[in-house]
Image: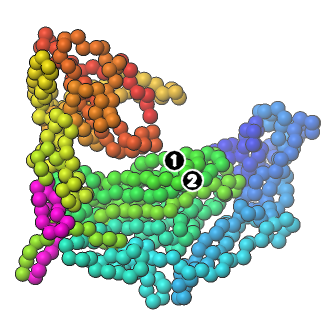
């Protein structure tokens, strides 16, 4: 570990350069004592370099050999000059709103301070900016007389100014929408985790900056700058709770960017009920301003964590403080105890005390004008998170029908195809169960072994088809709704009976599949073969991503 912390810029002598932590300095001193009495190499065999500033605010002069790997017979490391402050040693932040509703841009020295501001050539801390008006509160909050932001009471909403009651026939769409950053919200916290010994340093990892929040300087470049948002639970709308087939409880959407000169990484992690965080997505290097959405499928206490590391190398100095991650907005829907920025229509139920919101039966949409419930037409499904108006009923694809509660489209194991010469009637009842199929082992470009494993549930199942996939339609055509079933992947059919293709689509996105994934399953009838038939993978499979 010590050797990996003390490396030259060219990596030629892993025990001599870059000793910035105290324990590495001790190691170098012991190394110098061990080398006493050894013959010193000629000066033409090496040159001197200075380390970055260590935790004592000093640089060390070390000898770097011209021949890579030559780490003996070199002069001992010598403590050199003290470190003068540079623009990498301070950061900016915004003060909380004062009683006059004003905020101020301020500059602060990074902690721990390892530089001298009175040394020759040192930069001074920039003067604080002029006071400016505070931005509005975040949606769902209102500003008090002392300029602090408080949540609007349940049943009301706001755009960040005054609270207003939801009109009759509507209910608040509760959640959290953070887009103004003068103070850190009360359900968020930030810290710094060492990338060397994985100890928490008690420092601030992210700083507020008005219209965004960004990663602070930290103690060293390989520290993890951590930001955590905790949500106690979720309160989905009545239409979602009535739909037992729907998995989505809530979703989180955030807008971010990373600006990096080296191998930075931004991690997004999710933890349920105080259990260990699970990495969900990782972004490496510079990423332009973009939005990311994650769907929550379990009603539990959830923590969302962002961790930014400027470099994965054991760099203990501050070389890359200009490498940052920024988050502009975070929006979490259906939060228990959340606030509302708007009110959505709901179904009305009459009572002696007037009318109140109630849930529509499964498969029914809400008429915006009357607040009454209406059943979706046949062969349509209802999107539970947007059950407003007849347009919320989405038609099923060809060869499919809706289930009883209009939550999904499925095939009932039959299909008909009319041609000019004859009618083809297909019956897939023998394929109504769930089957699995695995491909032969393959290897990534880095030599990692993997294989494709498929679990198929084609038809007759009104509950759940393929995990995270929706059946788009069934057809004898090779293309449906932008999904293509390449004919060259299989041998041509020769019996004169058209192939049947099942088209599936998943809207779950990743960096590799930014538009989601699609799957096609081709069925080929051979009247000469007995049941149950056979499963076959195409001749080529897509690479691992």
| Dot 1 alpha-carbon crowd within 10 angstroms: few under 14, some 14 to 19, many 20 or more | some
Percent coordinates x, y for residue 354 in the rendering: 11, 80
Determine if the magenta segment contains residue 43: no
Q: Disc 2 designates what residue?
A: 258
Give the x, y percent position of residue 275.
37, 55
In the picture of the structure, the residue carrying the numbered disc 1 is 283
Q: Count neighbours of disc 2 (C-alpha within 10 A) and say few if under 14, some if 14 to 19, many if 20 or more.
A: many
Nearest the viewer among 496 and 430 is 496
| Above or below: residue 249 compared with residue 534 | below
Quadrant in which the N terminus appears: top right
Is residue 368 found inside the magenta-colored segment of the image? yes
Q: Quadrant of the C terminus?
A: top left
Q: Is residue 13 above or below residue 237?
A: above
**Residue 201 visible in the snapshot:** no
Give the extent of the magenta segment: 353-375
The residue at the far left in this view is: 352
Colour treatment of the image: rainbow
Which mark sits nearer the N-terminus, 1 or 2?
A: 2
Which residue does the image show at 46% across and 82% down from the upper left?
A: 148
Residue 502 in sight in this render: yes
Q: Percent position (x, y) of residue 392?
A: 22, 54
Relative horizontal placement of residue 171, taking residue 198 as reference (left or right): left
């Amino acid at each position: 570990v010590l050797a990996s912390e003390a490396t030259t810029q060219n990596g030629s002598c892993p025990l001599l350069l870059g000793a910035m932590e105290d324990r590495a300095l001790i190691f170098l001193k012991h190394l110098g004592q061990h080398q006493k009495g050894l013959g010193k190499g000629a000066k033409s065999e090496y040159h001197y370099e200075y380390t970055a500033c260590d935790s004592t605010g000093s640089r060390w002069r070390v000898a770097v050999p011209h021949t890579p790997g030559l780490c003996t017979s070199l002069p001992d490391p010598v403590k050199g000059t003290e470190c003068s402050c540079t623009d990498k040693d301070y950061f900016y932040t915004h003060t909380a709103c004062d009683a006059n509703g004003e905020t101020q841009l301020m500059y602060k020295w990074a902690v721990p301070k390892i530089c001298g501001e009175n040394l020759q050539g040192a930069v001074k801390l920039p003067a604080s900016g002029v006071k400016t008006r505070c931005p509005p509160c975040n949606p769902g909050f209102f500003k008090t007389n002392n300029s602090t932001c408080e949540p609007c009471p349940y049943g009301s909403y706001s755009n960040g100014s005054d609270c207003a009651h939801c009109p009759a026939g509507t209910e608040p769409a509760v959640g959290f929408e953070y887009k103004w950053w003068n103070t850190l919200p009360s359900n968020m916290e930030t810290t710094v985790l060492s990338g060397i010994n994985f100890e928490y340093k008690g420092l601030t990892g992210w700083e507020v900056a008005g219209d965004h929040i960004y990663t602070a300087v930290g103690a060293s470049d390989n520290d993890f700058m951590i930001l955590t948002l905790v949500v106690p639970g979720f309160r989905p709308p009545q239409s979602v709770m009535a739909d037992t087939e729907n998995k989505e409880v809530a979703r989180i959407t955030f807008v971010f960017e990373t600006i990096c000169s080296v191998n930075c990484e931004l991690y997004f992690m999710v933890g349920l009920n105080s259990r260990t965080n699970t990495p969900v997505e990782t972004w490496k290097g510079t990423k332009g301003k973009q939005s990311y959405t994650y769907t929550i499928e379990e009603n539990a206490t959830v923590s969302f964590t962002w961790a930014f590391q400027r470099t994965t190398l054991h760099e203990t100095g501050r070389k890359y403080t200009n490498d940052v991650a920024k988050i502009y907005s975070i929006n979490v829907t259906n939060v228990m105890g959340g606030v509302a920025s708007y009110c959505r229509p709901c179904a009305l139920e009459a009572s002696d005390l007037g009318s109140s919101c109630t849930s529509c039966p499964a498969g029914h949409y809400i008429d915006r004008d009357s607040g009454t419930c209406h059943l979706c037409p046949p062969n349509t499904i209802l999107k539970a998170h947007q059950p407003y108006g007849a347009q919320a009923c989405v038609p099923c694809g060809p060869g499919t029908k809706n289930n009883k509660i209009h939550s999904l489209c499925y095939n009932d194991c039959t299909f008909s195809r009319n041609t000019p010469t004859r009618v083809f009637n297909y019956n897939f009842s023998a394929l109504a169960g769930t089957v699995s199929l695995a491909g032969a082992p393959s290897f990534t470009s880095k030599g990692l072994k993997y294989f494709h494993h498929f679990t198929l549930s084609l038809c007759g199942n009104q509950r759940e088809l393929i995990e995270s996939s929706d059946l788009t339609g069934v057809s004898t055509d090779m293309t449906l709704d932008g999904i293509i079933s390449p004919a060259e992947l299989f041998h041509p059919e020769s019996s004169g009976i058209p192939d049947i293709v099942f088209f599936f689509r998943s809207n779950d996105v990743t960096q590799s599949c930014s538009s989601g994934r699609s799957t096609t399953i081709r069925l080929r009838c051979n009247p000469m073969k007995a049941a149950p038939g056979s499963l076959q993978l195409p001749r080529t499979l897509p690479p691992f991503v």
